[in-house]
Image (cartoon, rainbow, N blue to C red):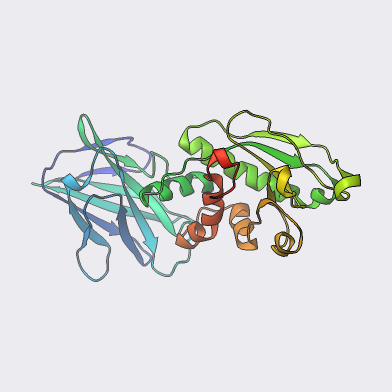
């Protein structure tokens, strides 16, 4: 017989069955169930795709399995929405997990299955949390896709010229996202240095360039004016045409859609979120020995 556990009243549950696991979603709004990270492909039980099964051996020690509820229309779950999840481990053992929060999300993490020395366990949400920051969410989705991030940016130099004042919210969103990415990976966040404007005579007003602040890793200047080839690497806040019409060195100009994702204050992240931010994620992990220059 399944035991019933309400959200917030449990931190970890042991799964003792040795046969296939069957998971069934109960939702008052149309939704499907997904499981990522399994060693074998889960099998859906019925056309509604709200129930799936996979053997317990599909959960391996190196890769936790994340179970998510996904809305049927790609619109966020409505306010105060919760779902239930049945976990059947065979031989009459299992759990009914009640009241799992999904509000405001399109792909809501419900539970994780982990292989530990003590056996198979369930934890709520993703990494024990019902919701992740955008940076943490990106890290987990990359890991699930077999593309673990290895960030190399060690120093961010911020242009403090007057033309950058209107981009202050963009800078804040970018640095927060990077901090969350690095925190999710358990590594030291980039050092942030405010750089005074210089080089007006040589390069024009508002030009910022500077040496590395750390011996290891990449130094990136966040500015609205691309750097010249010999002045290092820059992330440009502005129209993509800047990098095309000006003589530049190593630059990244995030698309408007990327900035929109960085500014969002909800957790309704989707595959489109990952697609839009992929260029930024790849940029974060460029080889450090080239200081951001692909070879």
Number of numbered markers: 0
Q: Is residue 220 above or below residue 295?
A: above
Residue at 27% from the left image edge and 63% from the top image edge? 50
Residue at 71% from the left image edge and 59% from the top image edge? 243
Looking at the picture, how far across and down is residue 124, in whole percent? 35, 42
Q: Name the foreground residue: 232 vs 55.
A: 232
Q: Name the foreground residue: 212 vs 37.
A: 212
Find residue 248 and report its image quarter.
bottom right
Return the residue found at the far left.
Answer: 91
Residue at 72% from the left image edge and 44% from the top image edge? 230
Taking the image as shown, residue 8 lies to the left or right of residue 154, namely left
Taking the image as shown, residue 9 lies to the left or right of residue 294, namely left
Looking at the picture, how far across and down is residue 259, in whole percent? 64, 56
Residue at 70% from the left image edge and 46% from the top image edge? 171
Instruction: Decide if residue 164 is in sight here.
Output: yes
Find residue 257 and report its image quarter.
bottom right
Q: Is residue 178 above or below residue 259?
A: above
Instruction: Decide if residue 77 is in sight here.
Output: no
Looking at the picture, how far across and down is residue 109, in whole percent? 38, 50
Looking at the picture, how far across and down is residue 273, in whole percent? 51, 59
Find residue 44 and report its image quarter.
bottom left
């Amino acid at each position: 017989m399944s035991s019933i556990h309400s959200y917030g009243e449990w931190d970890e549950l042991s799964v003792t069955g040795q046969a296939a696991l069957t998971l069934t979603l109960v939702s008052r709004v149309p939704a499907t169930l997904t499981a990522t990270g399994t060693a074998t492909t889960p099998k859906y039980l019925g056309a509604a795709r709200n129930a799936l099964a996979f053997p317990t051996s599909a959960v391996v020690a190196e890769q936790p399995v994340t179970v998510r509820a996904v809305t049927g229309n790609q619109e966020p779950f409505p306010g105060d929405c919760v779902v239930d999840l049945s976990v059947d481990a065979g031989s009459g053992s299992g759990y009914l997990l009640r009241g799992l929060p999904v509000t405001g999300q399109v792909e809501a993490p419900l539970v994780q299955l982990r292989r530990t020395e003590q056996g198979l366990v369930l934890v709520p949400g993703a990494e024990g949390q019902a919701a992740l920051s955008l940076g943490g969410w990106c890290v987990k989705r990359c890991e699930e896709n077999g593309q673990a991030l290895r960030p190399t940016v060690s120093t961010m130099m911020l242009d403090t010229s007057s033309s950058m004042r209107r981009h202050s919210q963009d800078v804040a969103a970018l640095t927060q996202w990077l901090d969350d990415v690095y925190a999710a990976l358990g590594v030291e966040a980039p050092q942030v240095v405010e750089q005074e404007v210089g080089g007006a005579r040589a390069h024009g007003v508002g030009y910022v360039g500077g040496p590395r602040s750390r011996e290891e890793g990449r130094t990136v200047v966040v500015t609205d004016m691309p750097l010249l080839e010999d002045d290092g690497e820059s992330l440009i806040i502005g129209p993509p045409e800047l990098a095309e019409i000006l003589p530049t060195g190593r630059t990244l100009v995030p698309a408007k859609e990327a900035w929109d994702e960085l500014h969002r204050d909800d957790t309704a992240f989707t595959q489109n979120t990952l697609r839009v931010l992929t260029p930024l994620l790849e940029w974060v992990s460029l080889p450090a020995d080239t200081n951001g220059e692909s070879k």
